[in-house]
Image (spheres, grey):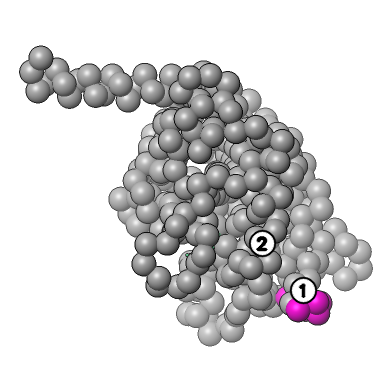
Amino acid sequence: MNVRTNGALDKAHTLIEALPWLARFHGATVVIKYGGNAMTEEHLRAKFADDVVFLRYAGLRPVIVHGGGPQIQAQLDLQGIDSHFVSGLRVTTPEAMQVVRMVLVGQVNRDVVGLINRHGPFAVGMSGEDAHLFTAERKHAVVDGVKIDIGQVGEIVRVDAGAVQALLDDGRIPVVSSIARGDDGPDDPGVYNVNADTAAAALAVALKACKLIVLTDVEGLYADWRPDAPAQEVISRIRASELAELLPALSSGMVPKMEACLTAVEGGVPQAHVLDGRVPHALLLEVFTDEGIGTMVVPDSDSGSGASGALEGRDSR
Ligand SMILES: Nc1ncnc2c1ncn2[C@@H]1O[C@H](COP(=O)(O)OP(=O)(O)O)[C@@H](O)[C@H]1O
Ligand SMILES: CC(=O)N[C@@H](CCC(=O)OP(=O)(O)O)C(=O)O
C-alpha cells in the first residue's frame, strides 16, 4: 500500500466513523447557540457556516440562536451608555435595551444569516419577538438571597415555535435573536433582553430537539475554574443532578450557560453540550465522531451505555 492509498483509507475511515451518528441523528432537530470566538474570528466564522450547512445536508434540522455580548458592549461603549453584569446577566436600562435590540436583530442576526447563505438560500433570520416566538416576563437576579432589579431582562414564560417549525419543514435554517416580547401587564416595557444561552435552551425544549449545543470560548466546563490557570481539567460528561449541585459554585458567563444545559435536559432534551468554538469544525467533531468534544450534560436516567458499537464509546465518556 502506498502513502496515497493510506491517506484515502484515513478519509474513508473518518466517513465510516460518522455512519452510526448519521443514522441516529437523521431528521433530528439540533439547537445551536452561536457565540464566543467562533463568532468573532473570520476563519472560524466560515467554518461554523460550513458545519451548519453540512448538518443540514446530512439530514439534521439545525436551528441557530446567536449571542452578541461583545458586539453589544462595543456599541454601548461607543454611545457612552453604562452597563454591567449581575449573575452573568446585563443590567438593561431602556436606553441600553434599544442598543441590545438594534445590535442583535439589525447587525449580528444579519451577519449570521449572510454567512450561512454563502452556501445557498438556507438561513432565515428572525427576532424572538416575531410570530410570538418568545414571550417573557421581567426577571430579577438573586444575589446572596437578595432580589435585585436588573432592568429590562426577561425570563421566557412561553415559546410558540410554530414559525420556526414551518421554516424547518421548508428546509430552511432559522437564525434567532434572543429578544422576547413582553406580556406582563401594565408595567410591561414591550420588549425584553434575554440571555442567548437561556433562549436557546427554551427553544430546544419547545422543539423537542435531540441536542442543545452551546459554542463558547473555553474547552468546556472546568472542574475547578480559576482565571488564567493553565491546563485545567474539563468535565467531559455530567449528569443533571451533579450539575445542579455544582451550579452555585460557578461564576460569570458559565452560570447562564450551564443553567441552560440543565433546563434543556430537565425539559426532555437528551443531551446538552458546551463546546470550544475556537476549535475549527467543533460542531462536526461533536456530532459525528465517537469521542465527541467539550462537556456533555445528560439526564440522571441516562445509563451511559450506548445502543451499540461505536455509540458506546462516546455515550459512556
Ligand atoms: N467552571 C468554569 N469552566 C469554564 N469556564 C468558566 C467557568 N467558570 C467561569 N468561566 C468563564 O465563563 C466564560 C464563558 O462565558 P462567556 O464569556 O459569557 O461566554 P460566551 O461569550 O461564549 O457566551 C469562560 O470564558 C470563563 O472565563
Ligand atoms: C440579559 C443578557 O445578558 N443578555 C445578553 C444578550 C446577548 C448574549 O447573551 O450574548 P452572548 O451569548 O454573546 O453572551 C446581553 O445583553 O449581552
In the rendered image, residue 130, in percent from the top left (x then y), is placed at 70, 48
In the rendered structure, the answer to whether residue 278 lies left or right of residue 141 reads left
Secondary structure at numbered mark 1:
strand
Residue ranking furthest to the right: 186
In the rendered structure, the answer to whether residue 254 lies left or right of residue 226 reads right
Q: Main secondary structure of the magenta part?
A: strand
Secondary structure at numbered mark 2:
helix
Which residue is drawn at the image coordinates 47% and 30% (left, top)? 313
Crowding around mark 1 (Cα neighbors within 10 Å: few <14, some 14 to 19, many 20+) is: few
Q: Nearer the viewer, residue 101 or 54?
A: 54
Which residue is drawn at the image coordinates 53% and 85% (left, top)? 80
Q: Which residue is mark 1?
A: 142
Residue ranking furthest to the top: 1
Which residue is drawn at the image coordinates 30% and 21% (left, top)? 13
Q: Quadrant of the N terminus?
A: top left
Judge whether residue 188 can be spotted in this image: yes
Q: Which residues are magenta?
A: 144-150
Q: Nearer the viewer, residue 222 or 172?
A: 222
In the rendered structure, the answer to whether residue 183 lies left or right of residue 43 reads right
Amino acid type of the residue that numbered disc 1 sits on in the rendered structure: Val
> How far apart are the alpha carbons under marks 1 and 2?
14 Å
In the rendered image, residue 245, in percent from the top left (x then y), is placed at 70, 58
Q: Which residue is mark 2?
A: 247
Which residue is drawn at the image coordinates 42% and 31% (left, top)? 289
Judge whether residue 172 can be spotted in this image: no
